[in-house]
Image: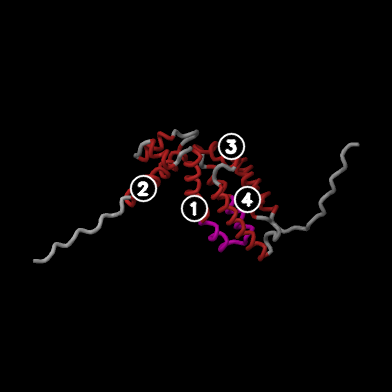
Amino acid sequence: MSRATPPPPPEPAGRPVRRDARRNRDKLVAAAQAAFAAADGPVALEAVARAAGVGIGTLYRHFPTREDLVDAVYAAELDAVTASAPVLLDRHPADVALRAWTGRYAAFVATKRGMMDTLRAGIASGRIAAPSRKRVAAILATMLERGAAEGTLRADADPEDVTTMLVGVFLAVADGASRERTDRLLDLLTDAVRPRARLPRPETPPGPR
C-alpha cells in the first residue's frame, strides 16, 4: 500500500503578514498622494486611512508621524523626477539639462499643496527627506560632472552647495511664489554654476574703531 503524499510545508507565519503589510503601506502612500495633491490645506490622516481602506491604527504602524507619511509620499513621487535626469542629459548640454530638471523639480514640489507646511518644515529642519535630498544631490553631481567635462558648467561647483541653493528655491515656492519668480530663481541658480571669469573676493572692511 503506497503512502499518501504529505502536504506541503506551511508557509512561514511571518511571510503573509509581510505581504499584507507591504500592500497596506502601498495603499496608504497612494491614498496620501491623491489626497495631498487634491487638498488646498492640511489633510487629515484619518481621511487617508479611510481612502486606503485601512484603520487609523494601521496607518500609524507604518507611519508613526505625519512627517513619516509625507516623506514616503515625497520619496515615491521623486522617482519620476529622478528618472527624467538621464533623459535630459542625453538630449541637451548639461547646463540646459540642469535648468530643465530643476524646473521640473520645482513644479513637482509646487503641486504638494496638502503637505506643503509639513514638507517645508521637515526639510528646513532636517527631520525628513534626508534620503531624498541625497538623491537630488547625486543627480546634481552627475550633471555637474558632465557639465565640467563639456565646459558648460563650473568644475568647482559642489553638489551639496547646489542642493542647498535648490532647497532655498523650494522654500520660496512653498511661500506661494509665482511661476515667474520661481523661473527667475532657477535661472540665477543655473547661471551661478556656469563658467565665468573668477573675480577676486573683496576684503572684509575693518569694523568701527
Residue type, label 2: Arg
Q: Is disc 4 placed on a helix, strand or loop?
A: helix
Residue type, label 3: Gly
Magenta stretch prevailing secondary structure: helix
- The residue under label 2 is 23
Q: Is disc 1 placed on a helix, strand or loop?
A: helix
Q: Answer yes or no: do the residues labelled 1 and 2 have beta carbons within 8 Å? A: no
- The residue under label 1 is 79
Counting residues from the start of the chain, the first of labels 3 and 2 encountered is 2
Q: Which mark is residue 114?
A: none
Choose mark 2 or mark 4, whichever is in front: 2
Look at the image and tell me in which quarter the N terminus lies: bottom left
Choose mark 3 or mark 2, whichever is in front: 2
- The residue under label 3 is 176
Farthest residue toward the left?
1
How packed is label 2: few (under 14 Cα within 10 Å), some, or many (20 or more)? few
For the record, the magenta segment spans 83-102
